[in-house]
Amino acid sequence: MTTQRTSRALAREAAGLCLTPLGVLGVLVALGSLHWAAGLSAAMGGVLAAAVLLPPQPDASRQAHVVRWAAGLTGYGGLTGCAFALCAPVGWIGVSLAVTAAGWWLATSQAVEGA
């Protein structure tokens, strides 16, 4: 049994869907006015968080997985670029963490296949 939503509930949801991106844009503009790297870091952190925290659907297409991986790589690459712009050693920490994660992923996928 399904229930139909009232027009008031639909209007409330539509208002929420319009206000949410406007609020995010306001935060990014405010951070960007402080320093360009602050706004860019927040934006890339959001892209990375979306890629990591939104679980893939079991029946998702290959393109959906490619887009999720691309969003994750774009977010992490943007954060690493901002880190290099602000302080080169912190940027190298970001690169080293990515290399470590890749090595760990390769080692664990090999161990799973061998089991």
Image (cartoon, helix red, strand yellow):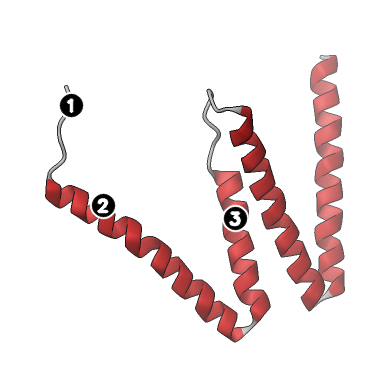
Badge 2 local density, few (<14 within 10 Å), some, or many (20+)?
few
From the image, which quarter does the C terminus lie in?
Answer: top right
Disc 2 residue type (three-letter): Glu
Secondary structure, mark 1, is loop
Secondary structure, mark 3, is helix
Task: Say which of 33 and 96 sits in front.
Answer: 33
Q: CA distance from mark 1 to mark 3?
A: 35 Å
Give percent across and percent down for residue 22.
40, 68
Badge 3 local density, few (<14 within 10 Å), some, or many (20+)?
many
Disc 3 residue type (three-letter): Val
Whether tag 2 and tag 1 are in contact, CB under 8 A, the answer is no
Give percent across and percent down for residue 66.
66, 37
Whether tag 3 and tag 2 are in contact, CB under 8 A, the answer is no
The first of marks 3 and 2 along the sequence is 2
The first of marks 1 and 3 along the sequence is 1
Mark 3 — residue?
47
Disc 1 residue type (three-letter): Thr
Give percent across and percent down for residue 84.
81, 71
Q: CA distance from mark 3 to mark 2?
A: 23 Å
Task: Report the side of 48 relative to 15 (left or right).
Answer: right
Q: Residue furthest top?
A: 115
Mark 1 — residue?
2
Label annotation for residue 92: none
Quadrant assignment, res 94? bottom right
From the image, which quarter does the N terminus lie in?
Answer: top left
Quadrant assignment, res 107? top right
Secondary structure, mark 2, is helix
